[in-house]
Image (spheres, rainbow, N blue to C red):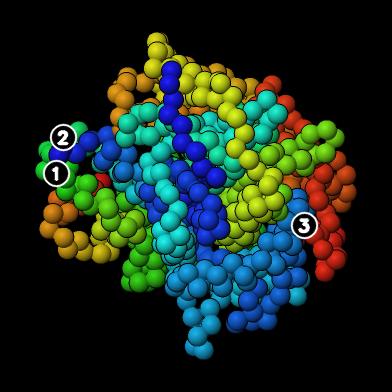
Amino acid sequence: MSINRGRVRWQCRRALLELDLVFMRFLERHFDRLTDDQLADLDDLLRCDDYDLWAFVNGSKACEVDRWKEMVGLLRQR
Amino acid sequence: MNVAKRTFDAVIVGAGGAGLRAALQLSEAGLKTAVLTKVFPTRSHTVAAQGGVAASLGNTTEDNWHWHMYDTVKGSDWLGDQDAIEFMVKKANEVVVELEHYGMPFDRTDNGKIYQRPFGGHSMNYGQAPVMRSCAAADRTGHAMLHALYQRNVRANTQFFVEWNALDLIRNSEGDVLGVTAIEMETGEVSIFHAKATIFATGGAGRIYYSSTNAFINTGDGLGMAARAGIPLEDMEFWQFHPTGVAGAGVLITEGVRGEGGILRNSSGERFMERYAPNLKDLASRDVVSRSMVTEINEGRGCGPDKDHVLLDITHLAPENIMKRLPGIREISIQFAGIDPIKAPIPVVPTCHYQMGGIPTNYKGQVIVPKDGNPNTPVVGFYAAGECACASVHGANRLGTNSLLDLLVFGKSAGESVVEDFKAGNLSLKPLPADAADVSLARMARLENQKNGTDVHEVRLAMQRTMQKHAGVFRFKDLLSEGAARILEVAEQSLHTEISDKSKVWNTARTEALELDNLIEVAKATMISAEARKESRGAHVRDDAPDTAENPNGRDDKNWLKHTLWYRDGNRLDYKPVNLKPLSDDVEPIALAKRTY
């Protein structure tokens, strides 16, 4: 089943402003160009807890799940 | 158009701390309960609350609810209702211990009790010395609380409607509330949630400001819905600002940075706080620091090309200390200001943080409106709790850690009131009017068919800039009156928003347009209420209401010791008395005094 882009876009709305701002930048720069596989990886990453996600983005915690690493790299781009 | 209808005993809008606490009360009492939420419950903004929850457990230092009540009334600058405040502080221990039993991982003392830490504004013996009253789970208190409450709700079989956006309140000709309309994002279909009781727990609307610490979801949906349905909004001029948000982003830089030696500087590099607070300097209270910063900016000594911020300088601190003591702050500055604070100062501005006003309620969580000469008449079937509600316990200024307490106590209280009203037979499923969904369907159709309209992002930005400039942390008579005219122009533009994406499912552009409809109501309420209140009190500080012998701190109790009520229709203002009488005879009223620390 294909993943709905609109749903994934909505789920980039988070509980923390820090993440909202990071995702806003990500949505502008990268989101529309993601392949279906990348979208699936993002969808999976978005299930993370917000504090874990923020720790991956700010680098205070290493992301150890291989399929998340590419998306975390894009989110970290300033 | 045929609209699907779902029927429940109760419908709750919002699944943050207040909504989840209310839902638990209903589900455990066996009521058929639906919780609508636009994001997954554990992604609600309650997650961001770090400080803790206040309760006079007295585990670490001596404490009692009388002292907590005094601190809260004083913190509110006497605008808080003393019956609701007494109710909240007396219930604090109960709701915290309950949460402990739900599995909340509070920090512990060596002997296994809940550890408590001190927090600004909380004192022992009526302001004598700091007290340890805040119960915390590291710096993740809101996060831990939300997870504990969510799991407990799953156990109680609460029915969640996740990624459903509530649209409008349904009322009948008597004004009773019969439920809400809502859109399911996955299908784009509008449904009616018909219920005997409706509880709003939709959080605050901090996104009305350009610089806000609030997450993007904080769009005041419950306030917009209430206002459109003719319910007044109370005390909306009172917003708490934090002095140091990253300029342009809003992300909060904790007070700890100044505690570690951080210095605020203006465009000429001057440590300007030496002029405003010669003793405490950069460590003066939040409101003093914020207003000093704004004065610097307004007098042309701001920094950057637009001279619109000041600088928080920690470059004189040893890099290893910054790395060790303030790592999170360095990450935030690098991410959102593009600046490594070891090498250059961080651009900061006072930033909107918390909404003290809201939908008027009593201490039972019942929504109350003026009717037939009684300013506090309950609206049948309607309840509210948390940041969207105004009980009013925070009055003109909230104390830290009282917000998590507010949502626990009044979430539970609203739930208990529904259960009591239900058991007493006071709640019934009243017939839906034939036009129950018409307002929502008309809004959807307008958005669908709008031609040559305005852009949602541009209108939202215009609103945010207007609010920031004209009703910010320090308020000026002329700016407020210009702002009142300007925000009505922006509101007019918001009636004609147009979206290019007309897709039915998962249309985030449409969701943002619907959110703007709610934000703009809150913005109008704030600006018009602020323009009208000609005194300074708590967070509302005007240049034309200075500190005098007759009006200490600019507070004018003779004319302004009253709650504002803003009505959407005609932007009408009304006022009602503050309740200075506690709920019981256990305590004397806290007498009016100048608020000094």
For disc 2, the chain is A
Q: Give x and y (percent) for residue B7.
A: 50, 38
Are the residues at dot 1 and dot 3 in contact (C-beta closer than 8 Å)?
no
Amino acid type, residue under disc 1 in the picture: Gln
- Secondary structure of the residue carrying numbered label 1: helix
Which chain letter goes with mark 1? A
Say whether residue B198 is visible.
yes
- Of the numbered discs in the image, which one, if any, rests on residue A33? 2
The residue singled out by tag 3 in the image is B83
For discs 1 and 3, the disc positioned in front in the rendered view: 3
* Image point (73%, 56%), residue name: B84
For badge 3, the amino acid type reads Asp
Outermost residue to the top: B452
Distance from label 3 to label 2 (Cα)?
57 Å
Residue B564 location (% of width, % of height): 74, 38
Q: Are marks 3 and 2 on the same chain?
A: no
Between B426 and B263, the residue placed more toward the observer is B426
Q: Furthest residue to the bottom?
A: B111
Q: Viewed as shown, does residue B519 lie left or right of B420?
A: left
Give amino acid for label 2.
Arg
Name which quarter of the figure residue B324 lies in.
Answer: bottom left
Q: Is residue B100 above or below residue B576?
A: below
**In x, y percent, where is residue B314?**
42, 61
Label 1: how many Cα within 10 Å (few below 14, some 14–19, many 20+): some
At x 45%, y 60%, the residue is B156
Residue matched to label 1: A38
Mark number for residue B389? none
